[in-house]
Image: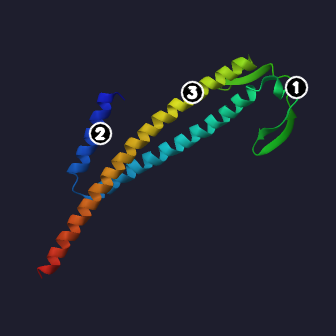
Amino acid sequence: MSAHENNDHDTDVNALIEKSNSVEQLEYLYSIYETQYNNTTQNINSHAKVMNELINSSLVLGKGDDIRNSSLVLNLGNSIYANARIENHGNILVNIGLNYIAEKSAGEAKEFIDKKIKSYEKEIEFLNKGRSEIRNVLFKITYKLSEMNARHEHHAGHASHSK
């Protein structure tokens, strides 16, 4: 979304919030944005988990000859682990995407992983920006709802005093 399109979207949402005179409509709009906020948070957490795994892999590969004949615990999947020993770390098998495996030198594998880490960092930054914008919309809706509730209570108070 371009900056101009994003600005138009913000204007549209702000206008919708301001023009709304229905609590139900605002609550519905709130639920939509709350779902978007929660989904974005889950995406951020998922990206962060993968990024942390990549960082750990990069750290291990950065140790060079220090990892030769080292013991490690290998995740075989489905919560099953095995003790393993790295005998030759000169050639690393790397999933380069779509489950294609490529053999790379340890240095090439580390470079590949470091590029993926940077990509995840950018994506998390983008998602955080979007989540912040969604949070701002949620605050605006909450504020408008509180204004409407205050007006309703004020009118209800006047109606009971006039009887």
Q: Do we see residue 29 in this rendering?
A: no
Callout 3: helix, strand or loop?
helix
Closer to the chain start, of discs 2 and 3, is 2
Callout 1: helix, strand or loop?
loop
Quadrant assignment for the N terminus = top left
Callout 2: helix, strand or loop?
helix
Q: In the image, what residue type sits under mark 3?
A: Lys
- The mark closer to the camera, 2 or 3, is 3
Compared to 18, does 148 lie above or below? Answer: below
Q: In the image, what residue type sits under mark 2?
A: Asp
On the rendered structure, is 32 left or right of 50?
left
Which residue position holds label 1? 87
> For the residue carrying disc 1, how many other residues have a C-alpha within 10 Å: few (<14), some (14-19), or many (20+)?
few
Quadrant assignment for the C terminus = bottom left
Q: What residue lies at 36% left-to-right and 50% top-to-bottom?
A: 138
- Give me the disc on residue 57: none
On the rendered structure, is 74 left or right of 30?
right
On the rendered structure, is 130 left or right of 114?
left
On the rendered structure, is 119 left or right of 1?
right
- Give me the disc on residue 10: 2
Rendering quarter of residue 104: top right
Rendering quarter of residue 50: top right
Q: In the image, what residue type sits under mark 1?
A: Glu
Query: Disc 2 and disc 3: Cα gap in Å?
Result: 29 Å
Closer to the chain start, of discs 3 and 1, is 1
Can you give x and y, in whole percent of width and height, for residue 62 in the image?
A: 73, 25
Compared to 143, does 104 lie above or below? Answer: above
Q: Do we see residue 119 in this rendering?
A: yes
- Give me the disc on residue 118: 3
Q: What residue lies at 53% left-to-right and 40% top-to-bottom?
A: 44
Residues at marks 3 and 1 touching, judged by CB atoms closer than 8 Å:
no
Residues at marks 2 and 3 touching, judged by CB atoms closer than 8 Å:
no
